[in-house]
Amino acid sequence: MNLDDALQLFIIEARELLEEMEEALLRVEQMPDDVETINAIFRAAHTIKGSAGLFGLDHIVAFTHIAESVLVRVRNGELKIDSPLVATFLAVRDHIGSLINLLECGAEPDDKVRHVAQQLTERLRAYVGNSLPATIQTTAPPAVQAVEAPQEDGVGTDHWHLSLRFNATVLQSGLDPLAMIGYLTSFGEIAQIVTLIELVPPLSELDPEGSYLGYEIRFRTDADKAKIESAFEFVRENAQISILPPHSKIADYLRLIDEMPDDDLKLGEILVRCGTLTESELAASLNRQAGNDTAPAPKIGEVLVDQKLVQPKVVEAALDKQKQAKERSGGETGLIRVNADKLDEHINMIGELIIASAGVNLLAQQHGLPNLLEAAARLSRLVEEVRDSALTLRMVQIGATFNRFNRVVRDVSADLGKDIRLEIAGAETELDKTVVEKIGDPLTHLVRNSMDHGIEHAELRVARGKPAYGTVRLNAYHDSGSIVIEVSDDGGGLNRERILAKARERGLVKNDQHLSDQDIYNLIFEAGFSTADQVSNLSGRGVGMDVVRKNITALRGAVEIESNEGYGTTTRIRLPLTLAIIDGFLVGVSRATYVVPLDMVVECVELTADESEAAHGSDYLNLRGEVLPYIRLRQLFNVQDGDSDVLAESEDDDELALPASAASSGTALLTAEGAAALAADPELAFLLHPVKRENVVVVQYAGHRAGLVVDRLMGEFQTVIRPLGTVFGGLDGISGFTILGDGNVAMILDIPGLVRRLARREPGRRAQLAAAAAVSD
């Protein structure tokens, strides 16, 4: 891995850590005494600082070090978590994110960024007094940390403990860490030294002028701390040095344990590294453990505590560190980072493989060779398994997107002066990563609208018998091959009459035009439409909701609104699970072929001439007592009949061809004498002029059922979705196309659009069918 790749990896990991920090900050505001959450915040900041130091990003190291100093006081119980402190660290998190963004762009912090950093430094100084520098430095501040004198709750050891971490460039500055360590022996004795090699890179990447080693030293001396610090006087700017005096507080050792690399160490090794235990003491304790006759044998931690060699709190901290290292190791071995572009290319290649497989199947069917048919069937199964596996790689949980709105709700509710809480359900629901990436902005508009327009102020809510706090809910679930995302609130709902009046005022609706509630609610998606009396920084300009609909439509989705005035509003977004490959159902109309998404197909039934006539032109069927609206694809797309209903001459003058509609497959050849015989037989004459049979494909979307009348049912088909070009982008009833095995093109039907079209038909047509059915009965 070269330096550029490593830097990109740092940027990705830093952003993940910042997301974890934000989630932890929002949790700790509700649970200020949650030690694990506080530690998570500290670990995120500390890891970013350490990684930034490896790349020489001194401005990030310096700023994060200041924030880390405040977090140390929080961890030690010297500072209590409250809303102002959380707000400060959320701003710190945002600023670090800005520095990471600038790093990705290759830009340096400008005056505005430096001004924000200075302001945040002043806010942080209020929590730690004058221990912070007055200005942000370009390099990390001296890392020698002051440690208080021995107090109660201390660790019993007569040794000083030195923790040394040198920057990679220390040798290039003419400074030798080993010479400094050797200087210590001039006024004391090194009782133990542990060399840390975790940061040493592979030999091919090792810089001979780089410094990669760290040291943990147990030092015996009668000198004071100032004398020990003087040994590192010239390296303070290029190292992180921690000096713990004998009998230091347990909290200091807990901090050292937490700052250790997440290696898979045993308990005793962790305690030796942090300086609370010597190797000889550990060996003696292990011998006692082995020589214990009780069953089961006591754990090494229990032995160390019984011998009063280590304080219980230090053992607990070491065990927690060991657990974290194992969890992190397990997660790293189970995951691998893949470039998104490479994954998309992989999916595209699988799409081409599916098309090629369909061609092989077609050739196998045409030749009818058993071995070829079997091989083609096996190939199809393998391609389908590969397809499913590849699509699974693209699927991600929507919970990460939902969790980002904890911050949005917190900040917007503070701006509005409302107490609003967020509830999340269905976070484990999975959908295509491309959809997840593009759904964030529409959801942000909807959530902010719910908070600004939907949720009332506390006084009005109480007067209406509601809780003083409002609730915004995010929910996701699967339904009929789609994913449904709901944004709901318990606010005042939409004012139907006010929306209608505003639409008439703008000329969107005629005065004598009657609209359903759903049609009225959909007016808020019109560009520039707003019922707000005042324009705020959140809403009122009439932009946002139209963008929501455009973005969702671009994802082949749909949006609908349900509202109950006085009780709340639910905005429901329906999206396809994937934008790449689907299981389809092929249907034919004359010589044209269409694809229906298989997940939306409920059943297929035959439409006889009698049933068609019984509908009396109303385009409704009586399907087992259920009123089913249907649409004829032949009429919708103006398909011309490509088959002839009369006998056609074949290349042989003595033979005639039956119409294609009279043959189950291929073309049936009939001699002239045979045709005359059929014509003479009343029971067989229909073969010459067969009755055209039609089929109804019953589909379902968003709880509504509809029928598609087609000529032929051609079975399942793995469909590679191809987007329509710009010229055909607005084609009604079509959402895309695919390529068949024979090279022909089949259009993919826009089932959501067709179902919505049928659902908008006048209710009177249903009554018309019901009346006709009553008469026939």
Image (spheres, helix red, strand yellow):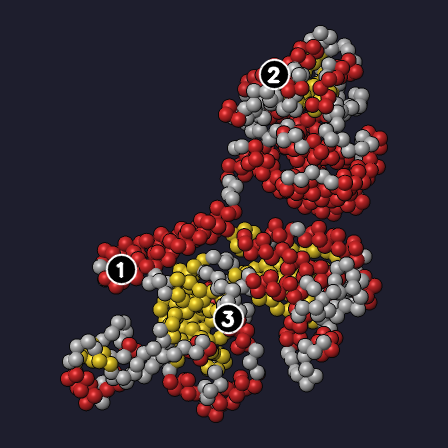
Give the left or right position of residue 578, taking residue 399 as reference: left
Decide: few, some or many residues near mark 3? Use Cα within 10 Å; few <14, some 14-19, many ≥20: few
Q: Is residue 364 above or below residue 608?
A: above
Quick one: label 2 or label 1, which is nearer the N terminus?
Answer: 2
Q: Which residue is drawn at the image coordinates 77% and 68% (left, top)? A: 532
Mark 1 belongs to which amino acid?
Ala
Quick one: label 2 or label 3, which is nearer the N terminus?
Answer: 2
Q: Can you tell which mark lies on residue 731?
A: 3
Q: Which residue is drawn at the image coordinates 62% and 65% (left, top)? A: 549
Q: CA distance from mark 2 to mark 3?
A: 77 Å
Quick one: label 1 or label 3, which is nearer the N terminus?
Answer: 1
Observer-side mark, 2 or 1, equals 1
Q: CA distance from mark 2 to mark 1?
A: 74 Å
Mark 3 belongs to which amino acid?
Leu
Residue nearest the viewer, comparing 694 with 474:
694
Residue nearest the viewer, comparing 165 with 79:
165
Give the left or right position of residue 724, taking residue 142 as reference: left
Q: Residue 438, how many percent across, how many down?
A: 59, 56
Residue identifier under label 2: 279
Residue identifier under label 1: 364
